[in-house]
Amino acid sequence: MIDAATNTVTATVGVGANPLSLGLFIGPAAPPAPAAATAIPTLSEWGVILLSGLLGLAGLWGWRRRA
């Protein structure tokens, strides 16, 4: 029997029965606590502006070099 509300599976095996079971069976355990949010480093607004400008200058330099 599968209970989706509690995320459990219940199986009853009779005396003398020899069921074939494949898989990993783990006893009851509480789910792990959710991990705390981790900060992701990003650029500031001015950093993005500066990086965009440098990328534009590098593109112009490469374009003029080939022309």
Image (spheres, rainbow, N blue to C red):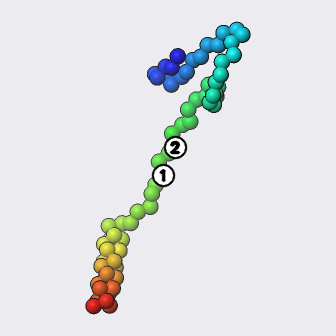
**Cα–Cα gap, marks 1 and 2:** 9 Å
Please identify the quadrant where the C terminus is shown.
bottom left
Depth check: give the residue in front, 24 or 51.
Answer: 24
Q: Position of residue 19 (x, y in %)?
A: 66, 18
Q: Quadrant of residue 29?
A: top right
Amino acid type shown at disc 1: Thr
Instruction: Name the residue at 48% across, 51% down.
Output: 38
Depth check: give the residue in front, 8 or 66.
Answer: 66
Q: Secondary structure at mark 1?
A: loop
**Mark 2, other Cα within 10 Å: few <14 / some 14–19 / many ≥20:** few
Give the residue pinned by disc 2.
35
Q: Quadrant of residue 53?
A: bottom left
Q: Which label is found at residue 58?
A: none
Amino acid type shown at disc 2: Ala
Instruction: Name the residue at 51% across, 20% down.
Output: 2
Give the residue pinned by disc 1.
38
Mark 1 touches mark 2? (CB < 8 Å): yes
Q: Secondary structure at mark 2?
A: loop
Q: Position of residue 24 (x, y in %)?
A: 63, 31
Q: Position of residue 45 (x, y in %)?
A: 32, 67
